[in-house]
Amino acid sequence: MTTHLQVLVVEDVEDDLLLTLRTLRRGGYTLDYVRVETPEEMQLALDHQDWHIVIADYTLPRFSALEALKLLQAQQQDLPFIIVSGTIGEETAVAAMKAGAHDYILKGNLARLVPAVERELREAEERRKRQQAEHALRESEAALRQSQHQYQSLAETSPVGIFRTDAQGNYVYVNRQWCDMTGMTLEQSRQMENHVNALHPDDRDHVLATWQAALKDGIPFRLEFRFQHPDGTSIWVFGQALPERKQGEGIRGYVGTITDISDRKFAQHRVREQAALLDVTTDAILVRAMNGQISFWNKGAETLYGWSAEEALGQDANQLLYADAPDDDEIDQSLIREGSWKGERKQVTQAGQSITVMSRWTLVTDEQGQPNAILTVNTDITQAKQLESRFLRAQRLESIGTLASGIAHDLNNILTPIYGVADLLPMQLPDVDEHIHHEFEILKSSAKRGSEIINQMLLFAKGVEGDRSLLSIRYLIKEIRSFVHKTFPKSIEIAVDVPKNIDSVKGDETQLHQVFMNLFVNARDAMPNGGKLTVSAMNIQLDRAVVSSHLDVEAGPYIVVIVTDTGTGIPPDKLAYIFDPFFSTKQAQGGTGLGLSTVHGIIQSHGGFITVDTEVGRGTQFKVYLPAIEAEERVEAEVLSFPLGQGDGVLVVEDEAPIRDIAQSILESHNYKVIVATDGIDAIAKYTQHQTDIKVVLMDMTMPSLGGATAIQVMQRINPDVKVIAVSGLPSNEQIALSLGENVKAFLPKPYNSADLLKIIPNVLQTDTEPVSKTVET
């Protein structure tokens, strides 16, 4: 078996070098060597490589073996150093060995070289292992000393008294805090008699008996007791100790602590002395025996629960304050163990009302430290818990809103082909009768209303602002009246008086529909036994004096819609809160408290305001004021016609087949050449193949396999001038799309109809670098 050897050779004669190397190879070594002839060469070799051994000629023209040895020693490298020379005197050889050389071999006797190398390598390895062991031992000893020092420092600076005993209970160690608590010095702590004498006379026998029992049975020691100092003062402590066991043997001693509990003991003692002062607090404070019998009942308890002290004293607290007897076993155990407990409790008052209290219990002990009573302080947090419940309800509603936002994409995907079909059919069937055309309009109207409902969900979820357009309040109220007339109880008479000359408003139809529907439903709920709902409207001019009391409202022409019912009315103490979020006058019927808050917010966002006039038992009247636009300013809907395309290629990228097919049909019917792709990967492949024919890409942003954003980025690398129209049912995707650069020319929200599509395509085709529009209105 061969051994690899890295050898540094100090030699100036080539033949001698070869002879040395041949001898080593014959001895079974494979060699990695460097020959050096000067100190500089040797220093360079030592700096750049690790060596197993150094073999040096004794004398060189510019160097010597002894100089090489000193250089090696200066590097503090423990390498075998063997001198090889032609002739040398015995005194010179001895001097070299004393200087640190490991062996001296004559060139005429190189047969000794291999055994010498083997020996020195072996001894070098033994030295290395010995040095490692010595180093590890020194580190272990240092770590042990450090650990002992840290333990000693921790023990001496601990705020609790620490002690250790032998198996017979004799103290072998105490820290300074232990001495301070017991009133003994370190010298006194070494005598067991001093420990016994330091115990309070009233506690001494009990402490010693408990301690001896623990020693005898090898069990933990836990006890509250007192030490009496030489000056006569006492200190209460909680002492605890655990047995230390030898490996495979019995107990070798105890280690434990004593904690100063004088303050807690003093506080418990003062509870009874301060009972007369507890009536000044609004909290309910009571003291009950361990069997539950009430022995103290302050004024705060009388106010909170309704029972006087005379009625409550002597009663069982569990039977008096709880609808069902509570299971307090775990609380009682925690109370005994810790001395106190805190938590929420559901209780009932004398009137049967359910309340929630924050209850704080403190264990009261007698002079012997035995549990004697429980001091309870109860704070009414019923209102706070109701507010917390409303907050949690708000979080749930926010989650519902987030869900609504999440499904908007899918719903818009469903509505988009409906929109498209409703537009395509009249083009493809121009000769159908008026009845069929009317049904097409119903289809378009239903799709539009569905889109508006989705936008309303997004408004609820993310605050998306609705579309504002010129609206006829008369038509809107007429539409709602038709609905409520069919759904409201027949016992409610509905009267509507909206003149034909009523002005229009600019607003979101769906939001204003929600406003008046909410007011009508509230009126219905206020008349469970029937009544009359009256709705009227008029044009009105408001001056600065009138609008000055309303924030962000300007003087000018308004319309006022008046909704009046003959119902129960709103109590005066609730009237100021009816527009607050989560405040409901219909909590028993499951009201969320969001209806009028939403109404107020929508009207305010439209630049208007709302007032209320009510009388309990007679009814309520709401007046909704909205900025008016004179009726003659109303514009007719624009009839749009779109020119035919010039045969330009459009790549339609859409994973939903109905939407993809409708978009293809609409574009092809207007002379566009359409290439379709089912996802981002397919789109890249189609664009790579047909990019010279494709003038614009209609890209859905949300698709499986590869999304629209990534596909757009890949297309930008293929063609920096690619024109893209981003499409999505999620408004949040607009910013993502437009952030991809100038190639994204427009954002088309779903659902879209043929007019939207045929309007945006030619606009994008005419662009060079600037985006057409942030968003195309649908």
Image: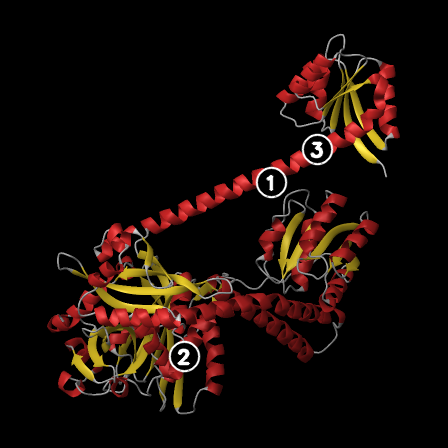
Q: Earlier in the sequence, mark 1 or mark 3?
A: 3
- Depth check, front residue: 32 or 604: 32
**For residue 407, side relative to residue 655 (left or right):** left
Question: Residue 98 got which mark?
Answer: none
Q: Which comes sooner in the sequence, label 3 or label 2?
A: 3
In this view of the protein, can residue 641 be seen by the observer? no
Q: Decide if residue 53 is in sight here.
A: yes
Q: Of callouts 2 and 1, which one flags the residue occurring earlier in the amino acid sequence?
A: 1
Q: Say left or right for 411 vs 628.
A: right
Residue labelled with disc 3: 123
Find residue 755 and report its image quarter: bottom right
Left or right, residue 76 beside residue 8: left
> In the current view of this chain or complex, which residue is farthest to the top?
61
Question: In the rendering, at what x and y percent does residue 411 appear?
Answer: 62, 70
Q: Which mark is residue 520?
A: 2
Tell me if label 2 and label 1 are in contact, CB under 8 Å: no
Which class describes the residues within 10 Å of circle 3: few (<14), some (14-19), or many (20+)? few
Q: What separation in Å lies between label 3 and label 2 (alpha carbons)?
A: 104 Å
The dot on residue 133 is 1
- Depth order, front residue of 94/630: 94
Marks 2/1: CA distance?
A: 92 Å
Q: Nearer the viewer, mark 2 or mark 1?
A: 1
Disc 3 marks a residue whose amino acid type is Glu
Decide which of 522, 486 is in the foreground and name it.
522
At 21% from the left and 61% from the top, the residue drawn is 198
Q: Residue at x 42, y 70 (%)?
A: 392
Image position of 726 with respect to 404: above or below: above
